[in-house]
Amino acid sequence: MDRNVSYQAVVFAILLSIWLVFSGQFDGFHVSLGVLSCFVVTRMSSDFLFSDREVSLRVRWREALRLPGYLAWLLYEILLANLHVLRLAFQPGEMADVEPQIVRIRTKLRGEFSRWVLANSITLTPGTVTVKVEDNELVVHAISAAAAKGLEGEMEARIKRIFEPEGGEA
């Protein structure tokens, strides 16, 4: 089987599984709508999701198993950022801690998908928005110095451990 077809089959199976779980509708109309929708999305996006076809499916499964830990950590960070923004909004006085700024971050992530995950993780975190991504540089708007300070470091390292670990295969 062609590697491209096998990757598309995996993407299709994942999307259809998610569709079935979240829709909860198993009649012919809904299932056929799900199959059609997942087929179209697979054809449109599988090149983006798995652009590096040299990586084995075993490695992709390992990445998939590492991802939930990152997502749990990200949700915790989003909670902390929400509390920070809430504190900024309700602090008495002139909002002295609000210092909007543009920060440029040079990332060591090599993969386009890894950089995409980093940019979107930053944007999902309240108080920060990724404005632009150019090669290995991200331009980010941060609401405060504290939000800007938290941009470099741990998030990138965690993404690197999932998608670009040292020592060969991901």
Image (cartoon, rainbow, N blue to C red):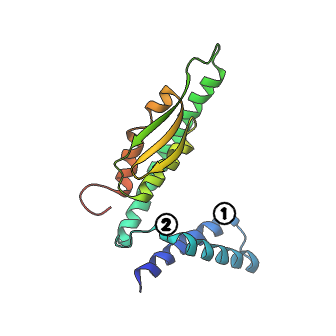
The C terminus - image quarter: bottom left
Q: Residue furthest front?
A: 134
Residue in the picture at 52% in, 49% down: 120
Quadrant in the rendering for residue 12: bottom right
Secondary structure at badge 2 equals: helix
Of badges 2 and 1, nearer the viewer stands 2
Secondary structure at badge 1 equals: helix
Residue 89, given in percent of the width and then of the height, sits at 65, 24
Q: Residue furthest top?
A: 93
Q: Are marks 2 and 1 in contact (CB under 8 Å)?
A: no
Residue 137, given in percent of the width and then of the height, sits at 41, 46
Q: Which mark is residue 63?
A: none
Q: CA distance from mark 2 to mark 1?
A: 23 Å
> Badge 2: few (under 14), some or many (20 or more) residues near its Cα, within 10 Å?
few
In the displayed structure image, the side of residue 156 where residue 166 appears, left or right: left
Quadrant in the rendering for residue 78: top right
Residue 81, given in percent of the width and then of the height, sits at 55, 34
Residue 35 or residue 116, whichever sits in front: 116
Identify the residue under disc 1.
22
Compare marks 2 and 1 and give the one earlier in the sequence.
1
In the displayed structure image, the side of residue 155 where residue 36 appears, left or right: right
Give the amino acid type for the residue marked by disc 2 in the picture. Answer: Phe
Report the number of discs: 2
Identify the residue under disc 2.
48
Residue in the picture at 51% in, 47% down: 132
Give the amino acid type for the residue marked by disc 1 in the picture. Answer: Phe
Residue in the picture at 60% in, 66% down: 18
The N terminus - image quarter: bottom left
Residue in the picture at 42% in, 55% down: 114
